[in-house]
């Protein structure tokens, strides 16, 4: 189901930490704990992309890494 979304959350955690993972989760309305259960639908992927771009706007390398996975 949500392999791409789950991988995005893993990268945020590794590269930016727990706080930013929580912010991405809150902004996207997709709990990181349920990332594997939600589908990698275009709507959900767009929610994650937008949240990642906003939360990690000061870390463009990580944003680009995640966007590559989500596309």
Image (cartoon, rainbow, N blue to C red):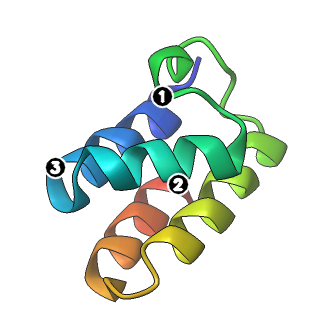
Residue 45 position in % (x across, y down): 68, 48
* Viewer-proximal residue among 71 and 61: 61
Element carrying mark 2:
helix
Query: What residue lies at 45% left-to-right and 42% top-to-bottom?
Result: 22
Indicate which label's residue lies in the foreground, 1 or 2. 1
Q: Residue furthest left?
A: 14
Sooner in the amino-acid sequence: mark 2 or mark 3:
3
The local crowd at label 1, few if under 14, some if 14 to 19, many if 20 or more residues have their Cα within 10 Å, is: many
Q: Identify the residue under disc 1.
A: 32
> Split into 4 quadrants, where in the image is the C terminus?
bottom right
In the image, residue 69 above or below residue 28: below
Q: Is residue 40 left or right of residue 3?
A: right
Element carrying mark 3:
helix
Give the Cα distance between marks 2 and 3. Answer: 17 Å
Q: Is residue 27 left or right of residue 59?
A: right
Sooner in the amino-acid sequence: mark 1 or mark 2:
1
Residue 56 position in % (x across, y down): 42, 74
Query: What residue lies at 39% left-to-right and 41% top-to-bottom?
Result: 9
Q: Identify the residue under disc 2.
A: 70
Element carrying mark 1:
helix
Residue 53 position in % (x across, y down): 55, 75
Q: Residue furthest front?
A: 19
Q: Is residue 52 left or right of residue 14?
A: right
Query: What residue lies at 46% left-to-right and 17% top-to-bottom?
Result: 33
* Label of residue 14 in the image: 3
């Amino acid at each position: 189901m949500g392999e791409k979304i789950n991988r995005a959350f893993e990268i945020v955690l590794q590269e930016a930490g727990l706080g930013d993972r929580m912010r991405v989760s809150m902004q996207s309305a997709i709990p990181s704990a349920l990332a594997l259960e939600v589908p990698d639908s275009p709507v959900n992927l767009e929610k994650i992309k937008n949240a990642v771009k906003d939360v990690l706007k000061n870390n463009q390398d990580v944003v680009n890494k995640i966007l590559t996975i989500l596309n």
